[in-house]
Amino acid sequence: MSYFQLENFFSNFSFLILFVSMIYYWINIAFNLKNKNLGTVGMILANFSIFTLLILRWKESGHFPLSNLYESFLFLSWNLTLIHLILEKITLFSNKSEKFLGAITSPTALFTNAFATFSLPEDMRSPSPLVPALQSNWLMMHVTVMILSYSALICGSLLSIAYLIITFNNNNSKEKVLYASNNIISQSDIGKEQNLISNEVLNNSLSSSSSISTNSNVYSLNFSNNLYTTNLNNNNKNVVSKKIKLADDLDNLSYRILGVGFPLLTIGILSGAVWANEAWGSYWSWDPKETWALLTWLVFAIYLHTRITKGWQGKKPAIIASLGFFIVWICFLGVNLFGEGLHSYGFIKMNG
């Protein structure tokens, strides 16, 4: 079997597996399926398939497979599946949060895989020699770290967007206060009920048998009504509690992932500056890619500053991270396709 046949097989297989995994995670959220490992198995197969495809391309081209947009998208898709598998193993969040994680990472990995496979031209998908500017050991260091950072930032930003959707039209802090006060009230009511029961039993033991029967019937009726009302309140509080727990999990998980992606982005920018000085004689030239990378860095620096220094949580930092999501995509995809600069290797410029 030739290289192109193997590439076509693993490319189509990874697309199919990611599509099935995405459908599974979405259905699992809606119907709470029993088989909880199917999505994980799908992500493992997709990860292995894309990894094999990259290795084959590395062997065929003779250089690290990150020289153009096609290879970068494949590597980004592989990173997203890898991040998903790592988070599933190390996080201690609820099953509902893990379902949301899969429902977010699988379509993102599918989109990047599909764009690379079906949207880019044939000449970009074919292995080609490195251009002179890329013939450097910095290629593996700089581009790998940058795409790793993009993967983490995209994933964390999507979790922040999910947090905003879940808490839409709701003030999370007010819900927490209300839930806490309801718990206090319900606990005090339970104590009062217990005292009333004790007093009722004591009074009934000192009264006549007919009085005991009458009082017991009246008390049973009142207690049944109170129990029914209490059960309704408990059900409402359970719904609010689960919603708050899911939102908090997504917020915390987003913060952790972005906390990893930001230093990776910093290392990637610094390594890129050193490489630029070797290749072009200048550490910084305000190339469109460099400018948008700096803007991306500033957005997520503001996000981490507000969370660490200001102590912000919830919607405000989530809005900043959501803005960062679009900035990352402009930096990664928009500049490559439409930008005019030293980093542009998009097919629109090639074909234009």
Image (tube, grey):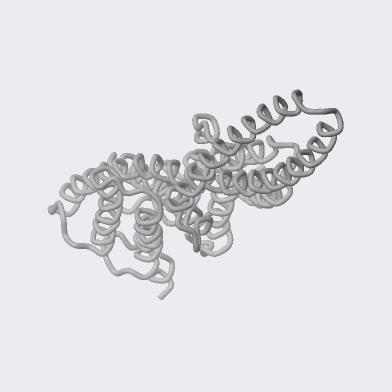
- Which percent across, then down, holds residue 240? 57, 49
Which quadrant of the structure image shows residue 69? bottom left
* Viewer-closest of 290 and 246: 246
Q: Relative to 19, say whether 286 is above or below.
A: below
- Which percent across, then down, holds residue 192? 59, 35
- Which percent across, then down, holds residue 157? 42, 53
* Viewer-closest of 239 and 156: 239
Visible residue check, residue 136: no
Quarter of the image that includes the C terminus: bottom left
Visible residue check, residue 242: yes
Instruction: Please give the name of the residue rendered at 63% of the width and 37% of the height, measured from the top-left corner.
Output: 40
Q: Is residue 154 rendered to the left or right of residue 132?
A: right
Instruction: Please give the name of the residue rendered at 67% of the width and 42% of the height, measured from the top-left corner.
Output: 1
* Viewer-closest of 67 and 270: 270
Give the mark count: 0
- Which percent across, then down, holds residue 325? 40, 58
Q: Relative to 338, say whether 266 is above or below.
A: above
Instruction: Please give the name of the residue rendered at 74% of the width and 42% of the height, measured from the top-left corner.
Output: 33
Q: Is residue 267 rendered to the left or right of residue 17?
A: left
Q: Is residue 240 rendered to the left or right of residue 200?
A: left
Q: Is residue 67 rendered to the left or right of residue 167?
A: left
Q: Residue furthest bottom?
A: 352
